[in-house]
Image (spheres, rainbow, N blue to C red):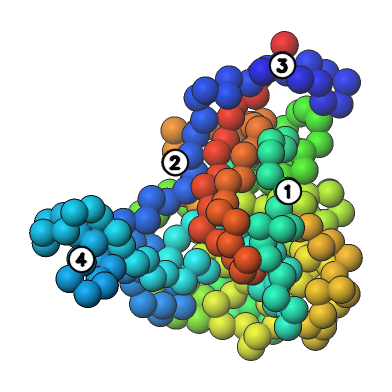
């Protein structure tokens, strides 16, 4: 594929994407967040029928149980924090968008002047506006509408437990993303906010353009903004410019399991 962006010509091989979703193994190791139960698969049963060929059934038919926000790679919309039931599949239009992948090192809260609500604990690790700005300053090319942020090389199928088990965005970082016109944010973190932040979800609200305390989707000034969490960007994928295909099922829910695909982009 050849295309133009920012007055320059680029090409991308649409047959060779990088998947940055964590495969959800219902029978094996899984990521988890917020002490959620494991995602499970069990055979459907109806009368004498069993949906498992290993148990004598004619075919396999399973009932899957999972919490999209906690059991793996997922994409969410403003409905995550509103009383209105907003469907992520209706807010994410689909198709390809220009994305930038950057690797950013979180910093200790005690070493940063940036914050959130409530104030971070000294031992918290923060994804700051300063770090994002420094990472993007090293990149050239047209401005992207999506940003993919890699912060870790840890095991992707880990359990995140406790009040602050992973880095999270500062209020200033979320505001910086908004100012840069980033509508799609992909993180290798379990949440854009601290696991226990008293229910403020500051970074989510700033990114969605939702006033503090509002639970009305109509109040959001960025109704199509979306956040993907618990992605896994392997070390073999270099920083740079990509086309992002954010694939998700047509669930009428605030979040759904997703499969972000990255297609490397090269200047002509």
Task: Please state which of residues 27 and 212 is positioned toward the viewer in this rendering.
Answer: 27
- Please identify the quadrant where the N terminus is shown: top right
In primary-sequence order, the first of circles 1 and 4 is: 4
Q: Nearer the viewer, mark 1 or mark 3?
A: 1
Disc 1 crowd rating (10 Å Cα; few below 14, some 14-19, many 20+) is few
**Of helix, strand and loop, which one carries label 1?**
loop
Q: Nearer the viewer, mark 2 or mark 1?
A: 1
Q: What whole-number distance in Å separates the C-alpha atoms at marks 2 and 4?
A: 39 Å
In the figure, 21 relative to 138: above or below?
below
Q: Would residue 120 be visible to someone looking at this image? A: yes
Disc 3 crowd rating (10 Å Cα; few below 14, some 14-19, many 20+) is few
In primary-sequence order, the first of circles 1 and 3 is: 3
In the figure, 222 relative to 93: above or below?
below
Q: Which of marks 3 and 4 is in front?
A: 4
Percent x, y for residue 14?
Answer: 58, 24
**Of helix, strand and loop, which one carries label 2?**
loop
In primary-sequence order, the first of circles 2 and 1 is: 1
Image quadrant in which you'd find residue 98: top right
x 51%, y 58%: residue:
257
Marks 3,4: beta carbons within 8 A = no
Label 2 sits on residue: 234
Percent x, y for residue 107?
Answer: 60, 61
Q: Which mark is residue 50?
A: 4
Label 1 sits on residue: 93
Q: Residue 2 carries which label?
A: 3
In the figure, 222 relative to 37: above or below?
above
**Of helix, strand and loop, which one carries label 3?**
strand
Q: Which of marks 1 and 4 is in front?
A: 4
Task: Please state which of residues 231 and 119 is positioned toward the viewer in this rendering.
Answer: 231
């Amino acid at each position: 594929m050849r295309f133009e962006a920012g007055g320059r010509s680029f090409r991308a091989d649409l047959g060779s994407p990088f998947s940055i979703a964590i495969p959800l193994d219902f029978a094996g190791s899984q990521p988890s967040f917020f002490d959620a139960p494991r995602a499970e698969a069990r055979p459907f049963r109806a009368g004498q029928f069993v949906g498992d060929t290993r148990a004598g059934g004619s075919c396999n038919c399973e009932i899957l149980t999972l919490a999209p926000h906690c059991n793996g790679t997922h994409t969410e919309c403003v409905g995550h924090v509103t009383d209105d039931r907003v469907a992520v599949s209706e807010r994410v239009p689909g198709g390809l968008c220009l994305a930038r992948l950057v690797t950013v090192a979180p910093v200790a809260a005690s070493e940063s002047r940036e914050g959130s609500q409530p104030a971070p604990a000294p031992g918290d690790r923060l994804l700051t506006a300063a770090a994002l700005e420094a990472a993007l300053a090293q990149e050239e090319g047209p401005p992207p509408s999506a940003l993919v942020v890699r912060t870790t090389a840890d095991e992707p199928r880990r359990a995140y437990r406790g009040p602050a088990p992973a880095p999270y965005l500062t209020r200033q970082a979320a505001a910086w993303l908004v100012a840069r016109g980033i509508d799609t944010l992909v993180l290798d973190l379990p949440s854009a906010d601290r696991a226990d932040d008293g229910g403020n979800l500051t970074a989510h609200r700033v990114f969605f353009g939702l006033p503090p305390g509002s639970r009305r989707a109509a109040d959001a000034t960025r109704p199509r903004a979306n956040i993907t969490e618990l992605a896994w960007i392997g070390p073999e994928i270099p920083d740079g410019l990509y086309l992002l295909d954010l694939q998700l099922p047509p669930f009428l829910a605030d979040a759904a399991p997703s499969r972000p695909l990255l297609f490397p982009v090269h200047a002509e």
